[in-house]
Image (spheres, rainbow, N blue to C red):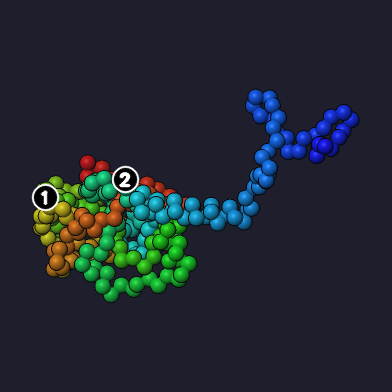
Amino acid sequence: MSSGACVGNQVAEPDAVSHADGEERADPPGRKPGKRRSLWKEVPILLGVALVLALLVKTFLVQAFSIPSESMEKTLQRGDRVLVDKLSPLFGSQPSRGEVVVFHDPDNWLAGEPTPRPNVVQTVLSSVGLMPSVGERDLIKRVIAVGGDTVQCQGAGPVKVNGKPLREPYVFAGNTPCSLDDHGGQFTVTVPRDKIWVMGDHRQRSADSRYHQNDKNHGFVPVDNVIGRAIVVAWPVTRWDTLPVPDTFG
């Protein structure tokens, strides 16, 4: 006796399905119809994938950094968020003159500066790249000279690289390119191989290479300390802008 229900002269087979060949075949005994995964199960998976992707982006592609001081005005203001290209250094690209770069503290340059105390949420979001890095001892300056260059400041300036004066429209209004002081503002140095010489755009408010010539690197920043080049101001939106190399370095 058929287990199907009779309708007129036809018998409806249980769980019959149509196949590409036009035939209808019943599902194997014991097979349950497919069930869609619960939304509550999908959300954690999607969040996990998003976090992994964000971590990979932060580690190998770009990372956001927050500007902590006025040392790079007028180019960058305190509180700006910049995106830093971390991919190029992985392929051997070295910093070039005129670039704005983020780098690890070479030798206690930030001594005496307050250390940020992020909360747990900030720390987690920062670690996966969903917000600017917090609690890291990093600096941001402009590359003025690279390995083999001779850089010089005499009087109020201009700064000279390999004897050629720089035209620096990015220097903060009211500042002179060189500082008239005896604590680093006047100098002539030759940059060693695999090092860079950096200066802030707010010349009279930037404790940069000029003022660390007595440290273990003599004020130079090792290329290995460079995290990457700042390529764009991403936040606030009213300050969105790119950070190209100025023409004077061409």
- Tell us which disc is closer to us: 2 or 1: 1
Cα–Cα gap, marks 2 and 1 = 23 Å
Q: Is residue 80 visible?
A: no
**Left or right of residue 117, residue 159 in this image:** left
Q: Earlier in the sequence, mark 2 or mark 1?
A: 1
Q: Which residue is mark 1?
A: 148
- Residue at position x 16%, y 48% in the image: 165
**Left or right of residue 146, residue 28 in this image:** right
Q: Is residue 30 visible?
A: yes
Q: Which residue is mark 2?
A: 244
- Residue at position x 38%, y 61% in the image: 133
Residue 185: image quadrant is bottom left
Q: Does residue 149 lie above or below 4 as drawn? A: below
- Residue at position x 17%, y 51% in the image: 146
Coordinates of residue 152 in the picture (x, y in percent): 13, 55
**Left or right of residue 1, residue 27 in this image:** left
Coordinates of residue 164 in the picture (x, y in percent): 14, 46
